[in-house]
Image (cartoon, rainbow, N blue to C red):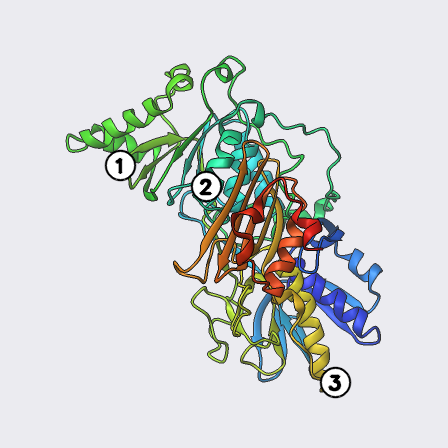
């Protein structure tokens, strides 16, 4: 169940392992996600792009896979029957739930607060942005970071709860390394003339009505690909004259959203004798924007106002809520046989099994309930969705054949490669010392505008690393984390730029 990367990868793997079996994929979206341009950088590191394809493409590739555009409504695990929203039933021998996750939107009641998760929500976002002069981005993860970097021709208020940007992935030092890219006018000018890696498909008019974006419904399609923001026109409505002044980005650190007001609610608040402080806070917030704000004096009324916990209140055209995701467990939440983890996901064993016979789960919807390897932990990322979907298929077949199956090697070490602010970014193992408390040391090498390398050492052994820039050190670091070589004798020279450690440890 699910047309995202986990579901599609699971179906493809099942088809490869059992070409004579009947496999069904249920997708609520008219398009499915497929992995393309797969590249293995090292034993654990992999990169790929994502294509949106019509449902029929999977059947063309895997003849024994039937794809149905349905929404799973009810699961009768005792009878092993899945019921869709139109009452159609599907009998199964083995079932894998890959329903993904939805944005954790801070206010679903206001249509000026949006989340970004799938193609439809991106189109809605682009349409809103084209007429906007100021937006607020709330959140400090991957999508928020990409948005703040990619949006042009628009003021951006970036509200984060941490003391540094992009803290989901980076420490304070890495955040400081990236900041110049955020505030440099030249860095904001991306070359969007390259060919998009994602294929584009259109839906027949007769089928589009039920997929038009509706901000009041939490009916998101499959998540966007890792390159979703590249080669898209993400520009606002500021004039050329207004763009000549000041920074477009204002970061508000260590704060969260306290309240959200509509334009009329704010005007009522402003007219009250008891809210002088709030009114002055609104004015002081605008003053923080300095030069460019002086060119917007006529905008006395904004469609939405956001009060932050630091006391500041900003008016803007709309708010982008990028505050993480919530696993889509609605299908099973009333069945007490399924165990739900603290993160809201369906708990699965080391063979991707749920607590219900013949039912598995993979991707964002699941919570890895086994004892993790020392250098691995779960993050709801594209790489792990693909890995879990593939491994779940192998486990399903192994259980059918009563064969033992070892834990997949991809769960030995956390490894993720991506791109932020036009830098190549590689995250390995406990890259932020996630499991080490305070018992670790850091080696650091930083060259302004070129590279940022941080290594986590525990008892003289490498436990994690962050590599930003084109260093070609990722495979060496991966091997050092996995083989746990004692590096004590190298000390700080381990990152000495005059020493070619890649050749030394080859």
The residues bearing labels 1 and 2 have C-alpha atoms spaced at a distance of: 27 Å
Q: Compared to 138, does 336 lie above or below?
A: below
Q: Compared to 337, does 505 lie above or below?
A: above
Badge 3 crowding class, 10 Å Cα cut-off, few under 14, some 14 to 19, many 20 or more, is few
Residue 142 percent location from the top left of the image = 53, 46
Residue 49 percent location from the top left of the image = 71, 48
For the question of whether residue 337 can be seen, the reply is yes
Residue 207 percent location from the top left of the image = 69, 50
Residue extending furthest toward the top = 241
Residue 312 in the figure: left or right of residue 164: left
- Pointer 3: what residue? 401
Residue 444 percent location from the top left of the image = 51, 44
Residue, x 45% and y 62% (percent of image)? 435
Camera-side residue of 108 and 168: 168
Q: Which of marks 1 and 2 is nearer the N terminus?
A: 2
The quarter of the picture where the N terminus appears is bottom right
Residue 3 quadrant: bottom right
Camera-side residue of 3 and 212: 3
Q: Which circle marks residue 311 in the picture?
A: 1
The mark closer to the camera, 1 or 2, is 2
Badge 1 crowding class, 10 Å Cα cut-off, few under 14, some 14 to 19, many 20 or more, is some
Residue 321 in the figure: left or right of residue 350: left
Camera-side residue of 34 and 303: 34
Residue 5 in the figure: left or right of residue 237: right
Residue extending furthest toward the bottom = 402
Q: Which circle marks residue 173 in the picture?
A: 2
């Amino acid at each position: 169940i699910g047309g995202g990367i986990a579901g599609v990868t699971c179906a493809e793997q099942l088809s490869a392992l059992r070409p004579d079996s009947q496999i069904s994929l249920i997708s609520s979206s008219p398009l499915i996600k497929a992995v393309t341009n797969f590249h293995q950088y090292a034993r654990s590191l992999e990169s790929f792009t994502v294509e949106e394809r019509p449902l029929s493409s999977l059947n063309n590739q895997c003849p024994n896979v039937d794809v149905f555009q349905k929404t799973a409504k009810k699961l009768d695990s005792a009878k092993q029957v899945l019921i869709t929203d139109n009452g159609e039933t599907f009998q199964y021998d083995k079932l894998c739930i890959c329903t993904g996750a939805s944005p954790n939107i801070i206010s679903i009641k206001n249509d000026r607060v949006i989340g970004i998760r799938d193609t439809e929500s991106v189109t809605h976002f682009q349409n809103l942005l084209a007429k906007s002069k100021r937006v607020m981005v709330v959140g400090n993860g991957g999508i928020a970071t990409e948005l703040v970097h990619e949006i042009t021709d628009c003021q951006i208020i970036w509200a984060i709860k941490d003391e540094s940007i992009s803290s989901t992935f980076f420490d304070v030092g890495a955040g400081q390394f990236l900041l110049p890219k955020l505030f440099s006018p030249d860095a904001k000018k991306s070359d969007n003339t390259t060919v998009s890696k994602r294929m584009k498909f259109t839906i027949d008019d007769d089928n589009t009505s039920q997929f038009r974006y509706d901000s009041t419904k939490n009916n998101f399609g499959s998540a966007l690909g890792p390159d979703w923001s590249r080669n898209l026109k993400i520009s606002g409505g500021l004039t050329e004259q207004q763009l000549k002044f000041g920074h477009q980005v204002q970061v508000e650190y260590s704060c969260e959203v306290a309240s959200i007001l509509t334009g009329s609610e704010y005007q009522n608040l402003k007219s009250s004798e008891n809210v002088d402080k709030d009114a002055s806070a609104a004015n002081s917030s605008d003053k923080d924007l300095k030069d460019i704000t002086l060119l917007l004096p006529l905008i006395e009324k904004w469609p939405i106002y956001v009060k932050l916990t630091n006391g500041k209140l900003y008016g803007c055209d709309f708010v982008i809520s990028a505050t993480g995701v919530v696993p889509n467990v609605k299908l099973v939440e009333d069945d007490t046989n399924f165990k739900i983890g603290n993160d809201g996901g369906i708990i699965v064993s080391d063979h991707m099994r749920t607590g219900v016979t013949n039912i598995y789960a993979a991707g964002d919807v699941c919570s890895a309930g086994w004892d993790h390897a020392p250098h691995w932990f779960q993050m709801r990322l594209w790489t792990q969705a693909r890995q879990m979907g593939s491994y779940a298929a192998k486990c399903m077949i192994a259980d059918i054949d009563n064969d033992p199956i070892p834990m997949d090697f991809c769960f030995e070490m956390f490894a993720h490669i991506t791109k932020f602010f036009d830098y190549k970014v590689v995250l390995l193992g406990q890259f932020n010392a996630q499991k080490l408390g305070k018992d670790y040391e850091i080696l650091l090498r930083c060259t302004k505008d070129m590279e940022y390398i941080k290594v986590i050492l525990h008892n003289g052994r490498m436990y994690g690393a962050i590599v930003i820039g084109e260093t070609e050190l990722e495979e060496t670091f991966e091997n050092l984390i996995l083989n746990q070589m004692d590096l004590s004798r190298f000390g700080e020279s381990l990152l000495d730029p005059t020493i070619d450690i890649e050749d030394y440890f080859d």
